[in-house]
Amino acid sequence: MKAGVITVSDKGYAGLREDTSGPLIKEMLKEINCEVVEYIIVPDEKEDIKRELIRMSDLDLDLIFTTGGTGFSKRDVTPEATLEVLERLAPGIPEAMRLRSLQITPKAMLSRGVAGIRKNSIIINLPGSAKAVKEHLEVVLPVLTHGVEILRGIASECGTNKVAK
């Protein structure tokens, strides 16, 4: 599988903050034999985020992750940008991620990330902190291979309890 990562951060884009979440996503995706082939840092600008989501899905990547821009700040527009490019929603993904995070902190309910499908790509918004990225990916990684297989027409059944390790 091939993936793209978009770090959404004004400070990261300006070189004022090191991105730790993007590299963590790249490292964790190795667990499911997924290679990050596209990685970019963009400012918290809706049109920049949309442009990269469209570009990466047009490259036919299996998975696209954003990190950052999912909170309550006025500059946090990642979910809105994502919703404007998605063709279909996948609400179970962010529901599962928030459920897991709520077991750790009640502040998890303030995360506004969304997930869905554009063309043949599954797009998932992750929070900006490396700690939260790790918590969220631990929840979804075991099922993403199957999700990609279903989307690509490689697999056709979701009725088993078997998930990728």
Image: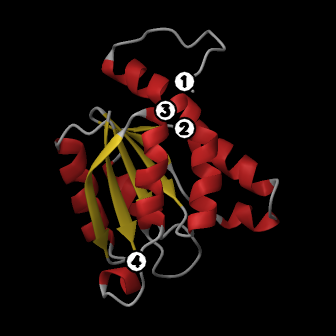
Decide which of tag 4 and tag 1 comes sooner along the chain: 4
Q: Are marks 2 and 1 in contact (CB under 8 Å)?
A: yes
Residue sitting at 61 percent across and 51 percent down? 136
On the image, numbered disc 4 is attached to which residue? 9
Q: Are marks 2 and 3 in contact (CB under 8 Å)?
A: yes
Say left or right for 43 vs 23.
left
Return the residue nearer the eye: 165 or 120.
165
Closest to the camera, between mark 4 and mark 2, is 2
The secondary element bearing badge 2 is classed as helix
Q: Position of residue 104 (x, y in %)?
A: 80, 59
Q: Residues within 10 Å of mark 1 (few under 14, many from 20)?
A: few
> Looking at the picture, which amino acid does disc 3 mark?
Leu
Q: Can residue 112 be seen by looking at this rendering?
A: no
> Looking at the picture, which amino acid does disc 1 mark?
Ala
> Looking at the picture, which amino acid does disc 2 mark?
Leu
Q: Are marks 4 and 3 in contact (CB under 8 Å)?
A: no
How far is the residue under mark 4 from the one under mark 1? 32 Å
Residue sitting at 80 percent across and 64 percent down? 105
Return the residue nearer the eye: 3 or 93.
3
Q: Position of residue 150 (x, y in %)?
A: 41, 19
In the rendered image, the vertical position of residue 75 relative to residue 1, given as above or below:
below
On the image, numbered disc 3 is attached to which residue? 144
On the image, numbered disc 2 is attached to which residue? 141
Decide which of tag 2 and tag 1 comes sooner along the chain: 2
The secondary element bearing badge 3 is classed as helix
Decide which of tag 4 and tag 2 comes sooner along the chain: 4
How far is the residue under mark 1 from the one under mark 3? 8 Å
**Quadrant holding the N terminus:** top left
Quadrant hosting residue 101: bottom right
In the rendered image, the vertical position of residue 128 relative to residue 54, given as above or below:
below
Residue sitting at 44 percent across and 52 percent down? 27
